[in-house]
Image (spheres, rainbow, N blue to C red):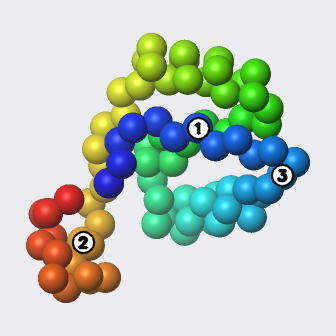
Amino acid sequence: MCRKPIILLNFDGFFDPLLQWITLAQEAGFISHDSAAILTIVSDLDQVAEAVQLSSLHFDVPFDDHFDWSVLCPSVSKYAI
């Protein structure tokens, strides 16, 4: 599981369907708030530079992914990730 910040440039609403899916997955309990917090959404290039600076200053999200990935991929150990 990625624990690095992700900055998504949502130019002209291109990623709106993905963001709606993430919101629904959070509401359903499939994605925790802390896991979704690694994602920063920006709409223009000026915001990208600012988001990169901010994410490097204070990014400390705890690892809270307790999903048993072996359910989806039996060859992967439950604790491999």
Tell whether 27 sits left or right of 76: right
Looking at this view, is 19 or 30 the one in front? Answer: 19
Tell whether 80 sits left or right of 3: left
The first of marks 2 and 3 along the sequence is: 3
**Alpha-carbon neighbours of circle 3 within 10 Å: few (<14), some, or many (≥20)?**
few
User: Please, what is the three-letter code of the amino acid marked with disc 2?
Assistant: Asp
Q: Does residue 30 sit above or below 10 in this rendering?
A: below
Residue under the image location 87 percent in, 48 percent down: 12
Give the percent coordinates (x, y) of residue 52: 55, 23
Q: Quadrant of the N terminus?
A: bottom left
- Residue 44 shows in this picture: yes
Q: Which residue bears the numbered disc 1?
A: 7
Give the percent coordinates (x, y) of residue 73: 26, 82
Give the percent coordinates (x, y) of residue 57: 45, 14
* Circle number at residue 68: 2
Q: Look at the numbered disc 2 and give the secondary structure of its residue.
A: loop
User: Please, what is the three-letter code of the amino acid marked with disc 3?
Assistant: Gly
How many angstroms separate mark 2 from mark 1 (CA)? 27 Å
Give the percent coordinates (x, y) of residue 72: 31, 82
User: Please, what is the three-letter code of the amino acid marked with disc 1?
Assistant: Ile
